[in-house]
Amino acid sequence: MRSRPSSVSIALILCAGLRAAPAPIPELEALQLPRPARLAEITRAAAPEQWAQAVPALRAAARTAYEHDKLAAASAWLNASRWAMLFAQTDAEFIPLWIKAIESAHVGHANMPNRFEMTNRPLGRWLSADLQGWLMGNAAFSEEFFTLRAPQDNLPAVFQILNSLHAGDPAKFARYASLALAIAVVYDVAPPPWWPHAQVSATALPRKLPAPADAFAWWIKEDTSGRTFHRLTRLPADELKFVVDAAAPFGELKWSQQIADYPLGQLDKAYTMIRYRQDRIANNNPIWPGPSYALHFILRDGGICVDQAYFATETGKARGVPTLLFCGAGNDGRHAWFGFLDGAQKWQFDAGRYAEQRFVTGLALDPQTWRQISDHELRFLAERFRTLPNFRQSQTHEAFAADYLATGSAEAAVNAARNAVKMERRNVVAWETLVRAEVAAARPPRQRENTLREAALALQLYPDLEATFVTRVCASLRARGETSAADAEERLLARKNQSKRGDLSTQQARDILVRSLNSDKLPAQLQVYHSLLDNFGRGAGIGFFDQVVVIFVQHLVQLGDKPGAERAVARARQTLRVESNSQLESEFARLLETVRGKPNRP
């Protein structure tokens, strides 16, 4: 049984010159879903820029409902308080946190501005009072927004986009709210230079998104005209963001609808419409050679796999189909393919992927954050469990855990996070919040390690997540001086992933190597390198070559040990699976030329 709060009717501080704070919400009312009249009353008192006064009463109501096990009411009150907190947050408070999130995720890039406005005005100023009221009163949109929101979202830009789309046509905004949200979280930050892939120059394909209003109008027109394969009003924003991230201009998208007129079930044929250019591979020319990357030039001139994948993804987006462009490293080379959401609302991730090449994990970009989408996120997309009631209840518990943690109630945060992971073991955010809460509650390291192991076990069907949590266990063990135990767990994990998830095994091998390079002397480094080749390199492909062989060889070259570097190349070539006339064979040849100081072949 959870303890009850001492009182919902907490004293509210009145700031000079501001409107009076909303009256405390009675306990009986807090145990029910918020009445529209109450939310309208709060909005009238707070909008557009005095929302800080509303936060204490809304948060108190939310916690009252939560601590009485009224989850539906608790979630609704909490979302209202979260809106109030966002509207009240100032630029000076938000921007430093946002920049830190960008830096920690390593998604900063040259197309982003270098300066940001840092005022003490609240973020709510970017939203009209009418839109603020709509957001406060729309439970479905609130849940979608706070579920989708990422730390890398530039909220001032997100709010400005939402506000402009709402002002243009409030009725269309309400009907296509998920589309508006998808556009807002994708278009809030300029795309990076390597989007949608790095094998085309900026002159051939300018990295520029259209105006949000133009994108909103275009996809609504295609949807209402019946030209989209999915009804856009039925897709959530976390799938629509893979529609609105089209790199091709609308004119090219329109052209593709006529030229690649395949039904949704045969969308994979758009990939093979592009004639494969063997001459570009033979000449080691992966960069698009033409002056323009327009879709009709790709169809006319042909291309390599990445051009085929780009053509297919843009063709899908033109039809309102969420699509993803994948790049991956296999045993004998690199490849690109695409994925799409089919007519049964299931993700197909292998269009254009060649099974005989045994490519491991494909990498795709999340247009919301411009991060690479992790393997487990792709699995989560395919499983679609995040729309189920259990997961939504788990999210509510996690949201309260985060809220308790933010206000210094560490024990309450631990309990709420525990409830979240009990409700849905796949709630990764809840596991992360639980770990942070245990740190704040001063739980001993062994207990925190057990929690990390518990998370790894709960998420063992998602090897990248399992590896993440086990790696953190190892780091904690090393911090306590348990180096041998950490090494044993790390090697056990690498061996477990070696057969089916060579990419994760390779990552573990890379971590072991880098740690040796940073702490050991050269003889020990050589021993570690040879051990990694013997244990993880036999039959490995280009991923192991990139992550282990190249790193170690370059290290030896920097030390001035070119003979040793040549021996390291030869040893790796004997161990890895190097097929004649493969891309991996060419990579080995280029690496050896680099070691010897010869110019790379074109």
Image (tube, helix red, strand yellow):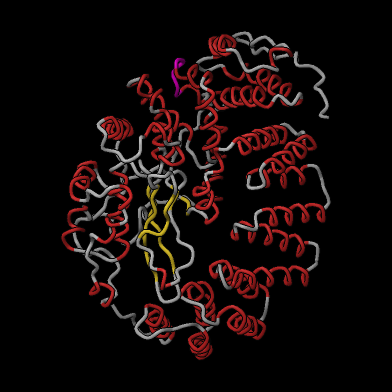
Screen quadrant of the C terminus: bottom left
Residue at 44% in and 24% down: 126
From the top left corner, tell me how far across and down residue 404 is, in percent: 72, 32
> Is 445 contained in the magenta span?
no
Q: Quadrant of residue 64?
A: top right
From the top left corner, tell me how far across and down residue 123 is, in percent: 50, 26
Residue at 30% in and 53% down: 266
Residue 150 is left or right of residue 470, and the answer is left
Front residue of 47/146: it is 146
Number of dots carrying numbers? 0
Q: Is residue 558 above or below residue 335?
A: below
From the top left corner, tell me how far across and down residue 476 is, in percent: 75, 59
Is residue 87 among what the camera can see?
yes
Q: Is residue 67 above or below residue 105?
A: above
> Is 129 contained in the magenta span?
yes
State which region is magenta: 126-130
Residue 106 is left or right of residue 283, and the answer is right
Residue 307 is left or right of residue 549, and the answer is left
Is residue 247 among what the camera can see?
no
Screen quadrant of the N terminus: top right
Q: Quadrant of residue 452?
A: bottom right
Q: Is residue 344 above or below residue 337?
A: above
Residue at 63% in and 83% down: 531
Front residue of 545/222: it is 222
Q: Main secondary structure of the magenta part?
A: helix
From the top left corner, tell me how far across and down residue 484 is, in percent: 77, 72
Residue at 63% in and 37% down: 390
